Image: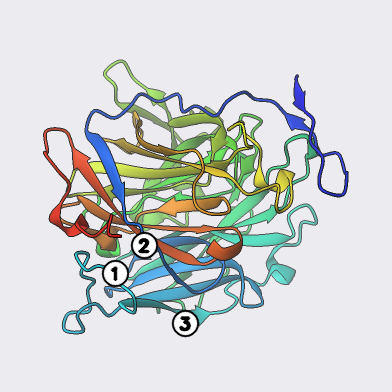
Amino acid sequence: MERIECRELDGTRRDYIDYGPAIPPQERSDYIVEVKFDRYRYHCGEGDMWPQTWGKDGSLYTAAGDNKGSPMNFWRVSSYGSWSDGELDPGKLTNTNDWTIDLIDPLPIDPKRYCLNPDAPGVKPAGLLDVDGTLYFAVEAQNYGDRPEFNRQCNLHGWIITSRDYGKSWNREATPTDFFTGRLASCHFLQFGRGYEGAMDGYVYAYFPCGEDGRSYWENGDGMLLGRVPREKILCREAWEFCAGMDAAGNPCWSPAEEDARWVFSYPKMTGENHVCYNPGIGRFIMGNYSFVDNEVRPRPIHQMRWPQAYRSQLTLFEAEHPWGPWKLFYRDDNWGTYGDYQPSFPTKWMFADGHLMLMVSSGSWDDYNFVVQKMAVRLKGEEGFCPQSRYFGFR
């Protein structure tokens, strides 16, 4: 296999495998035909990852890694907006001071107690879900890469903790720490509405990003698996089943056997730990994908190099009519953010104008290492322009 010769600034060799150019294999969307981002980005808090869920109490909840002296912590996002109804006005020039995030728990999981595998000493937030007022918080135990030829952050196992008082206390024994292993180690819940309102059926769905080698990776993986479980049995591992492909009529086949699971999304060496949400206004599932590239837009994990050589990421956005796809590309940026941003997601609480305006949450290296919010408008096929709320996006 061909390798690309690369050296760090001190001369250390950090060669990596040449997987060719990072070109999404999915066809272009014929439904979302154009995207417009706000020039402003709003920052608050500290850390990265930031999975979110819309709580039944109306608040947005999120979690972060690597901040405030802690490997992982839990936050509430408070919206102030017009002060009368506590909601954002997406048509304003900026939303400065219209929202903030407040730290609720600085250490939901102590890795010294729950990360006892020396190969996975760290812990990060993976997925978060509110179902009728109960929070399900999926966490992952990881390392920062153990394969020098393509050094991706690796997740070895994951589990779920729960809270009935929005993070003031946790049931840390809700599942064993090996609830999910191998390519299922990173669990990302599919988001619907407030407290899981508007769900498509009686199941909870979750995505599992992984590599073709059967391992789970934070960046530059190969695809995603899809699992589901009855909403009243989330903590019962035996109740989970996985999408094992499609039947002749185009309907998903489900199997309780993990080994039967097949990818519902594939982007070789360019699949991140992706989040998916349902946008009811436009009737589409939305997924933000990221991974890291070199200056020639070839896959190169961020953990392969150090700053300033590791700084560039690719953002790709996809839509689908069903959680299992097929996924279609509607946006691509080969040099996203300022120092390689990552972990894009779209909170279902922050969707406006009949779903035509969404707020994208992300994080990134260096100056973007916090809760970053940016407005995004979409234009659908047959529409002449973007929604009026986006009129200030290009303001100079």
| Helix, strand or loop for disc 2 | loop
Can you identify the residue that label 3 sits on?
A: 168
Q: Earlier in the sequence, mark 3 or mark 1?
A: 1
- Residue 220's image quarter? top right
The spot of residue 67 in percent (x, y) is 61, 72
Residue 369's place in the image compared with 333, above or below, is below
- Left or right, 240 with respect to 110, comes to left
Give the distance between the C-alpha atoms of the residues marked 2 and 3, in whole angstroms. Answer: 33 Å
| Helix, strand or loop for disc 1 | loop
Amino acid under label 3?
Lys
Q: Earlier in the sequence, mark 2 or mark 3?
A: 2
Amino acid under label 1?
Thr
Instruction: Between residue 285 and residue 14, name the one nearer to us.
Output: 14
Residue extending farthest to the right is 11
Q: Residue at x 70, y 52 (%)?
A: 308
Residue 4's place in the image compared with 226, above or below, is above
Can you identify the residue that label 2 sits on?
A: 40
Give the distance between the C-alpha atoms of the residues marked 3 and 1, in whole angstroms. Answer: 32 Å
- In this orientation, does residue 171 appear? no
Q: Residue at x 19, y 57 (%)?
A: 391
Residue 94 tag number? 1
Residue extending farthest to the front is 396
Q: Residue at x 65, y 62 (%)?
A: 123
The spot of residue 283 in percent (x, y) is 19, 42
Tell me if mark 2 has few (under 14), some (14-19) or many (20+) residues whose alpha carbon lies within 10 angstroms of its own. some
Instruction: Between residue 132 and residue 384, name the one nearer to us.
Output: 384
- In this orientation, does residue 8 appear? yes
